[in-house]
Amino acid sequence: MGGQFAGGDLRPPFAGLLGQPPEKLIINLPSPCYVIDEEQLKKNGELLGRLAEDTGCKVLLAQKAFSNFNLYPVLAPYLAGTEASGLYEARLGFEEMPKKEVHVFCAAYREDEFEELLSYADHIVFNSPGQLLKFGPAAKERGKSLGLRINPEHSTQEGHAIYDPCAPGSRLGATRAQLDDALSHHPQLFKLLDGLHFHTLCEQDSDALLSTLKAVESGFGDLLPRMQWLNLGGGHHITRPGYDMDTLKQCIHYAQDKWNVQVYLEPGEAWALNAGYLVTRVLDVIRNGDTHLAILDVSAACHMPDVLEMPYRPPLYGSGEPGEKPHTYRLGGPTCLAGDIIGDYSFNKPLQAGDLLLFGDMAIYTTCKNNTFNGMPLPDIYAMEKPGKFKRLTHFGYENFKRRLGGRQV
C-alpha cells in the first residue's frame, strides 16, 4: 500500500466514510468492486421526501441512473414510484417497488412489447403525436394515464450537448409546431391526453428549471389548464450541496396554482448522488516522456462509461487536481482502447503497484451502464450498511460475459 489517504478527505462524495480512511474500511473487499452506501441513500431519500411533503409534488426514481433494486427498500418510503425508459425497467419497477406508481417514457414503443408494458405501467408518456395516436387508444381502454413529451425549444445546458434534448434537430419531445400540425389533422388526439412531460436538464440547479418553465408556459400554457398532471422530468441536482431548493419549490407551487395540475419530478442522480464508491488497485506504473501513468484494474470504458461520454472526471479520495500535489499521474484502464483514460490526478506520494484507490459518486450511471468490452469482468456490487459493514449483492463471472454473446442451441 502506498498510503495515499493520509489526511482524510471530507468532500461530499466521501462524507459517508465519516472520516475513516478507505485503507481501513475496505481492505477485505475484492478489487475492483462497487460499494453502495445505504446511509447516504437514505439521506438523499429523506431530503426528497421532505420536498414532496412540503409541496405536494410526487417524486419518482428514474431507474436509468440507479437501478440497484436490492436498495429500493431504502428509498421506497420517500418516493411515489419509478420512471422507466422501456419494458424491462417498467417490469423492474413493478416487481421491485410494489404498490408504487410505474411511469414509462420511450422515444418509440414496439408493437410486440406494448401489451406486456400495459400490464406494468400506470402512466405512459409518448414522444410524438404519431405514437400517441397509434398506441394511445388501447392504453386508454386499459385505464392508463397518458402523456406527451414536449420540447420547449429552450436549451439551458453548456458542455453537455450529447444530453441536451432541446438541441437543434432533437429527436426527443414534440415542439408546439409539431403538436399543432397533428391536432389540425387529428383533433381527437387531445382527448387522449392527461398530462404533459418535459425533460431538458442535466445535473442542473433550479434556476434552469425556472427559465424552462417560463418557456413551457409561453409555448404550451394554453393547454395546461386542460391537463391533470405536469411532469418536470429529471436532471434536477436536488441533493447536491448548495442546490437552490426555494426556487424549486416556487416552480412547483406556481405550476400547481396556475394550472391545477399534479406535479411530478423524476430525478435519477439525486436519489443516489454521492452514495457509491468504486474500489480499484494500481496494476502498473509507467512513464512516457514527461507523463507518469498508472494502469488500474478498472476501466473508464467498461466500468464508468460517463467518464468518456460526458466527459466526466470522477472524484478520487485523497487526490488533487493535476499539479496540486507533488506527484501527478494519468490514470487509465487495462483495455486495448487508447482512450480508456479516467483522468489526471495528483497525490502526496508516488503511486505503486498494489495501491488501493477509491473513486466517489459511483452509484449513478455505473452499474446500470457498465459493459464487458475486451472481456473485462464486471465488478461485484456491495452494499455498505454502515462504515466497515458490507453485504455482497451480486457476483459476476465468466458466464455473465459469455451469455451476452451467444448460447447453445437446444
Image (cartoon, grey):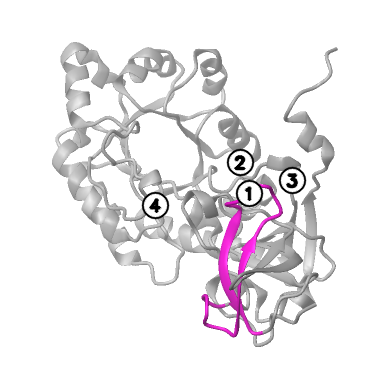
Q: Where does the image place residue 234, in percent across and percent down from the top left?
A: 41, 48
> What element does badge 2 sit on?
loop
In front: label 3 or label 2:
3
**Does the segment drawn in magenta span residue 328?**
yes
> What element does badge 3 sit on?
loop
Sequence-wise first label, 1 or 2: 1
Q: How many marks?
A: 4
In front: label 1 or label 3:
3
Q: Where does the image place residue 80, in percent across and percent down from the top left?
A: 49, 45
Amino acid type, residue under disc 2 in the picture: Met
Q: Please give the residue where the numbered disc 1 appears in the rendered image.
A: 72
Nearest the eye: 407 or 353: 353
Q: Please give the residue where the numbered disc 2 appears in the rendered image.
A: 97
**Does the segment drawn in magenta span residue 322?**
yes
Which quadrant does the C terminus fall into?
top right
Nearest the eye: 351 or 394: 351
Q: Is residue 387 above or below residue 342?
A: below
Report the side of 127 relative to 8 (left or right).
Answer: left
Q: Marks 1 and 2: CB-CB under 8 Å?
A: yes
Sequence-wise first label, 1 or 3: 1
Disc 4: CA contacts within 10 A as few (<14), some (14-19) or many (>=20)? many
Q: Please give the residue where the numbered disc 4 appears in the rendered image.
A: 202
Amino acid type, residue under disc 1 in the picture: Tyr
Sequence-wise first label, 3 or 2: 2
Give the spatial CA distance, label 1 vs label 4.
23 Å
Which span is picked out in magenta?
A: 320-348
